[in-house]
Amino acid sequence: MKDDLSLKIESLQEKGKLFSVLYVEDEKLLRDSIVQFLSKFFLHVDTAVDGFEGFEKYKKKKYDIVITDILMPNMNGIELIKGIKEENKDQEIIVISAHTDSSYFIEAIELAVTGYIMKPVNFNQILNVLNQSINKLTAFRENELYKNQLELMVEERTKKVFELKEELINNYQNVIYSFVKLIERRDAYTGGHSERVAMYSKKIAEKMGLSEKECELIYKAGILHDIGKIVTPDSILLKPGKLTKQEYSLIQEHVEVGYEILKESPMYKDISKVVYAHHERCDGSGYPNGLKAKEIPLLSKIMAVADTFDAMTSNRIYKKRNTVQKALEELKKLSNISYDKKIVQSAIEVLKNIDITNYIDQEPVSVIDDEHFAYFYKDPLTLLYNSEYFDFSMEKNSDSNNNFQCLTILYLKNFTPYNKKYGWNQGNKFLKEFASYLLDEFSEFRIFRIFGDDFALLHRVHANIDVDKINSIALLQRSGIYCKLKHISLIDTHISTYEELQEEEQG
């Protein structure tokens, strides 16, 4: 029995020979690769290196299917699509792009493209979209040929058109969901959070006796409620610490962005309304419109409770998660203030036994995650980790049975007189060179700049550091600065913060 992939390939090979394709892409290697792939299925495949050349070719010779990139010289993909749609509003167009700017994505959807495929290219996904286009074109051709035949034939072909329309809707939904997955890849907390909010919201809605349609609607809205964060800068979305007032105001914009993305599609119109109001609060303290109790849609009020419950029970770097019981107690205190009392009562009933022990938190889980995470905690002068990341490392070390057992402090002596004599610029240059030396010499250590001109080195096992060897390097010899060293066993001494280290030094 043939698998699904084989059937897709056979279908495209059988039907594709009757259709022509224009592929517009400025990246030569990708263009050659895709053309080689397309030539296996279509009788005629033309290429263009940018939107201008593609549009000129299209005007001279109409094509059944146009496949185009977004960002290209001379004329970009959006401009090309607009030009083609003016020539033929029903033209089948597929976008293949690595560009994730929401404005381009929304424009492409509004221009009724058949599919939006993200780079790197998944050829199985291309097969799906091409089959949809071919089936649609075939159905329309056959409909023209047989429109005057028997009523049964018309009915059958009409059914096919509806099926193809359903496929187009499903494809659009897949495009939207792919953007949700893109957000998940940017921020694991946000991805897991969306799935949990969807589940909690649906459970609460079911408990309140809402219809199956409403329960399904709120679940889909939960999955999509943070889609607007696709435009949130990484420096804010991925920031491990607390947001500033200005940063918080920027992240609030995700509600309106999500609403604008979703409302354009009839299939997401109801969902967009739920998403738009899920940060409103019964006392009018929410955003974006400061709505009060009766002004807020019921499903949005349910999602607000689910959203807050998940925030309370999820780990953030600056805030340990609450237990389920404590989170529900906090929600109960906020009944008839921020949240609807009846909704909170239902939430307490369905969420009191939720198991959250294995849920995703914000902490890094791999070496790559750790380095990406630490980007926010780098000292700008030396590019070593700063005292805030020292706090995080030590606190996590206390919670994880001493992954780090050895802490060595290097004190720079005579650095202050050196600064006074040669100036701050020269002092900064010295610190950068010394930090570079430490990174090369102690690459297996996690190194921090602390107390301004001192350094902390963490190691997973006890490590002897030769301070005389450090003092013999040319940088220290010519500057008159020297190091003193102190070793602290983290098995014998509990230090979990920068402040505790300062107290240890003063003691």
Image: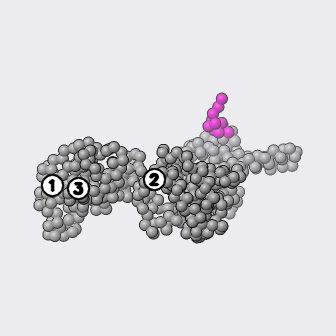
Residue behind mark 2: 321
Query: Is 260 inside the magenta-drawn segment?
Result: no
Where does label 1 land, which residue? 484
For marks 3 and 2 on the same chain, the one whose residue lies earlier in the sequence: 2
Q: Position of residue 7 (x, y in %)?
A: 65, 36
**Percent from the top left, x then y, of residue 217?**
66, 54
Viewed as shown, does residue 448 lie left or right of 123?
left
Q: Is residue 376 above or below residue 199?
A: below
Q: Measuring 41% from the left and 50% from the top, which residue is drawn there? A: 363
Q: CA distance from mark 3 to mark 2?
A: 29 Å
Q: Residues within 10 Å of mark 2 (few under 14, many from 20)?
A: some
Q: x%, y% of residue 396? A: 36, 49
Q: Earlier in the sequence, mark 1 or mark 3?
A: 1
Q: Quadrant of the C terminus?
A: bottom left
Name the residue located 28 percent from the left edge and 52 percent from the top edge.
495
| Type of amino acid at the residue the image marks with label 1 | Lys
